[in-house]
Image (spheres, coloured by chain):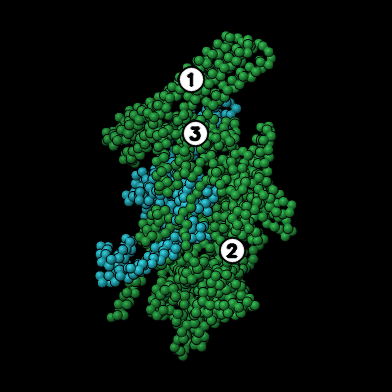
Amino acid sequence: MTGIIKKIAQINFGLLSPENIRKMSVTKIVTPDTYDEDGYPIEAGLMDPRLGVIDPGLRCRSCGSKGGDCQGHFGHINLARPVIHVGFADTIHKILRSTCRNCGRILLTDREILDYKEKIDNFLRNEENITNVLKEIYNLARKDDCPHCHQSETVRDNSEKLMEKFEDLVKEIEGSGLKVDSKIVEQIEKSFETLQTVLEEQLTSSLRIRELESQYDISMDKTNLLQVLDTIKNKKDEGLSTIDGRNLKKKAMANYVEIVDELLKLLDSEIHDFQNKMDSQTLKTVEKFLEEISTVFEKIDEKNQVKLGTFHKYLNEYEKTLKKFLETLKKFEDAKIELLVKAEATRRTEDDIIRHIAELEFEGSDEEVTHIKDLTENLVKEIEKSREKEIKEDIKIDKPVSLVEGNYKLTPSEVRDWLEKIPEDDYFLVGINPEIAKPEWMVLTVLPVPPVTVRPSITLETGERSEDDLTHKLVDILRINQRLKENMEAGAPQLIVEDLWELLQYHVTTYFDNEASGVPPARHRSGRPLKTLAQRLKGKEGRFRSNLSGKRVNFSARTVISPDPNISINEVGVPEMIAIEVTVPVYVTEWNIEQMKKHIENGSKIHPGANYVIRPDERKIRVYDETKESILEKLEPGYVVERHLMDGDIVLFNRQPSLHRMSMMAHEVKVLPHKTFRLNLCVCPPYNADFDGDEMNMHVFQTEESRAEAKSLMRVQEHILSPRFGGPIIGGIHDHISGGYLLTRAGSVFKEEDVFQMVKKSQLPMPEPKNRDWTGKEIFSLLLPDDLNMVYKAEICRKCDECLREECKNDAYVVIEKGELMMGAIDEKAFGAFSGKILDSVVKEYGTDHARQFLDSATKLAISGIMKRGFTTSTADEEIPREAKDRIEELLNNAEKRVEQLIEAYHNEELEALPGRSLRETLEMKIMQVLGEARDKSGEIAESYFGMDNHAVIMALTGARGSMLNLTQIAACVGQQSVRGGRIERGYRNRTLPHFQEGELGAKASGFVQSSYKSGLDPLEFFFHAMGGREGLVDTAIRTAQSGYMQRRLVNALQDLNVNEDGTVRDNRGVVIQTRYGEDGIDPAKSDFGKVADIDRIIEEMRIKAKADK
Amino acid sequence: MDIKKVEKAVKKKKADFPEQLIQEITEAAKRHELKAGELDELVDTLKKAYERAEVESGEAVGTVAAQSVGEPGTQMTMRTFHYAGVAELNVTLGLPRLIEIVDARKKISTPTMAIYFEEDYAEDEEYVRTLANRIGKITLNDILMDFNVNYASMTLSIEIDEEQIEEKRLDYDEIIKKIEKAFKKVEINKNLLGFEPTISEAKHAIRELRLLADKVRDLQISGIKNIGKVVIRKEGQEWVIHTEGSNLGAILKMEGVDKTRTTTNDIHEVEKILGIEAARNAIIREAQATMEEQGLTVDVRHIMLVADMMTADGTVKSIGRHGISGEKASVLARASFEETGKHLLRASIRGEVDHLTGIIENIIIGQPIPLGTGSVGVIMKQRE
């Protein structure tokens, strides 16, 4: 009723900073309790009234609005210690791994940083996903040494500090008057000095490596090398193929090829672990190869030498590039070795110092000695610590949130400190937008507490309150947080604090995601895992898929469906019970006010009544018998009356699974007695509905626009043609087909009085009386448009080798001339769903209105036809005479004998295996073939006794229901049962059932059912049949799940595609997917089975018309 | 009536027909011996039909295509293996194959090739057989006449069947060379070969001998990488090789192979060797063949759209969270498909912006979707 006033243009995502969390919070939550004894919410508790209200009677203490209007307000919990957010644990891990623990910069050289910044900028500008670039960065930024800060420098500074400390220590010793061995002190001093120089050297050599890095780019050389190698490979085949083929036997050539191949193979294996193996050793091998190649090359005759020339040149080039690469590599190696030597020297000096300090002995009072000893010990510790820092340990993640460096588990505080060190310039490279988020915010210091509206508590009938899972979790967090705080304040041992900290981390982790791998899920008292934040959003029952992408609606109904051949395909029969419940809002105007008054007078219980009236001030008033009068008095234009559903209203009708757009179509309402939805049988195929208890849904439109759209786009008649293949999907089924055949088959005549009765019933215009009997074809012609011409072969066509056309014995050659059915019987090919030819051309040539009328009348006529003739079937239809049974038995016995022969041949190894098959497989295939043929032949025998006077046969041949295979299985022989696409093998060891010998391969032992359904299966056959049947059931169950998921993925991937004004198909980013839809711009739903039109038919019609004009 | 005439007639009527339609008109014109006047009339009628059948802008072609490809999935069989054309080779068919195609699997379960030959060679059985033997995997076991493990002397002796070599069009010298290369201790006496195991420890001697026996038997003496069995068949007049396993790159380089018709069912290989356009056509061909084999009719245009979507970025991408759906621009669209938490968290630190241009985004926030009747608006003309 009201249009969209504001449109949401975009949604920005971001991370909440601790400040923001505090800012948006209305209160700090401290107490882990919710209500006091009187049932009032506790202040600063989880149900604090400032967080919003749910009860409609109360007012919110923060915003003052009533419950229901107040959307709630956040609170916050100050965490005693920082805690890692589970969702970001992985990201944090990656960031830590790719940044320097010293200076916080990303471990990329300046050049790399520039490159990647540009790359990311580019990607962001094009709205492309940067995940892959980030992955690349994470992989590259795993250097041992930080290119930005000089770790050695810090180590040097550190050692200076240590020396100062040592000097202080010496002074203190001197001051204290303790006696020390001055020699040792001197030695230590000396060692410190050497340490200084050695460190200096170490620094220079590490700087040298950095210099080299900026000079040469190894990765560039590497790509060069690979490129040349690639060309070699390509050129190789190119070069060789010119000589290949029939000249292959030339020895020199072959030799050459072989050596080259060998070389390439070697290089191929090199590529896999380039860095490790590309050394001088390889160079030597390669050189050797190249030499060999050259010598062999000279032996090749001149003609071929010329052909190979370019290729050979490439080999030489490769050699050159490889040498250059190795030279560079060598430089790096040398520098690295030097650095290692220097580092070793430092290490030794440090060891010296530590040893010497240990040698120190003091003489004096105990008190002072212990004091000094403490000091020295401290010094040693510090030296050791500074050494440890030199070795960079890889950081590993221990799911879900523990970050481990070597053996040491980083505390969240340390992680946070590290993340804080990362400069803003590097945020982009680790995948963080500096305008939106800071990495340290991924470690929580404050936890937002969602308003009560997000986690409402339920009052049970007993008056007991039951809290939401989130509230439970928040209580846990608060409790541990409180304990942690108290313990810390009381100065509890580190161990206890750490334990509590870990527990807090666990609760916060499960509060966010209770299915995080590596943590036991938090459980309710009853043992049910709690549904926390991530679970609320995730999956099929999560917020996204079940509350945002789909919603529960009003004005809908669901009930069992049943057939009604008397209503149009456009209609749906709605039970009165439903019609008085779902309503249509109608604006009261001067023109309809009288009508509306009548509805209100009827009230809500009598059918064309009204349930509610909406006043212009938007107040909704229920229509009761008592209030009727006053409403009627006030009713005037501007009111809205929600009147009952009535005949002619447009509603949406749907059956799940909604696999295609024809699963939801608009129908016209027809209010009918009883309690089921009624639908015309022709719309069963698009909905895939039957009446064995199926239920369907109905939705009533509430706005004029939706009704208009539905009526022009979604009405059943607009969907007769399926967009899948451009043919009819709505059409006659079952008895419509049998009826049509009985009506129109050769020799079918009706008395005129019967004809008129049938015509009347089919709502066709009354024809002129003929005063004689009518043929069925004449009756059917009444349906056809006067200028319809067509020729086609009916379903009953036996596909004879040579078509007799007009002289067809089966009356399968259908000819329609100027709307007259000249010959041929009407069956599935005429107006059946999926294949109706006449229906198809009626829709395409005369439009959907005409098609609907045609279908409604045709089906009714067919039904009248079948009613006049009478139609029934029973097992008697599948009866065959004794002699036929004997023949079939003989045939099957022969087949069985033939199988025995095959098995014997197999055992005697006389059987010849098919190419590429084992003997056993060959036997299986042959047996299957023999038994299959036997089944088919037995079927043919049975068929020869079936005639067109047999109702079951009529159904099978006209395409109404069932197949000849079904009939012959009932009458003659069921045939081979299969499991997993082959004969039955499973069961006992080497046999299917204990009734057989081990290793028996005969027909009976592997599930061949000789009996017919009618004669009955013996117990063994029955069992095998059940096996095959079960497989079928399992198969269907799995298939629905698999294909359902496939379709969901397909729809999700393609749903944003749209045909633009210019005819291109684009996605929502504007990327062109097709320049012209389907290469020709044709809509398959409007096409003629995928083609623009049937050119042959157009030409024929053109000629007929031209003739007539003359 | 030739194609030029038709083109002229089409141009005269200002009809924008695709090439294929013009081709069809020409053929029909030939068949019916159309006169010039009649041709004009035909083009006129067709123009009307064409305009009537054209897609309207705003049509949700993607959804319709997805439904048209997905809906028949329910009617497909699950039976994985079936004998397609060549009884000797197994090929994955039905729903599993269709899923494999839309998943753009790197390793398909049954790769196979159909190798056709150029005119000069197509009917040359001898040549085709020679090539087939170079393509297909042949192990030493296939050409053995006698195989003897002697536990007394701890040796292995085999006899090579010359007839087999002849039949398989192999080269004796080459085989011997390969054997010499693979085994150090080998004694060659024309067709009789003796092997000795290299024994490191006496107690494992018998095992070593047996291992050697297996190794000798499994020694590949001919064939192209990744290709197993081959089957030669006569199709009409020409000879065709069907293979188990696929290596398009190597096959196309062989002499006499018809590069225009030889195919593989491995889409990634087609992409690698022939490029993205070829991969697109391979997807269409494979998907359609799968549908047709099951007796289901699906308009090519739907399959084309799926294939185009999969290949639009220049590489073959799968349909699903690792491909198209996982790389959508919209956060909400990704979150509502799969891996909800991951996408939301990632969006938060990257500060992503959802511009709400897609379908689900607008459904989620409750606005009309930018498709069909939702993609148009009413513009009021302002009074002067």
Q: What color was chain A assigned in the picture?
A: green
The image quarter in which residue A813 lies? bottom left
Q: Label 3: few (<14), some or many (≥20) within 10 Å?
A: many
The circle drawn on residue A677 is: none
Instruction: Please report whichever mark, 1 or 2, sits nearer to the chain's N-terminal start.
Output: 1
- Is residue A674 rendered to the left or right of residue B120? right
In the rendering, at what x and y percent does residue A208 appear?
41, 24
**Amino acid type assigned to the residue bearing label 3 in the image:** Gly
**Residue marked by disc 3:** A104
The circle drawn on residue A199 is: 1
| Towards the viewer: A148 or A322 | A148
Q: What color was chain B assigned in the picture?
A: cyan
- Is residue A159 rendered to the left or right of residue B23? right
Q: Mark 3 belongs to which subunit?
A: A
The image quarter in which residue A388 lies? top right
| Towards the viewer: A470 or A859 | A470
**Amino acid type assigned to the residue bearing label 1 in the image:** Leu
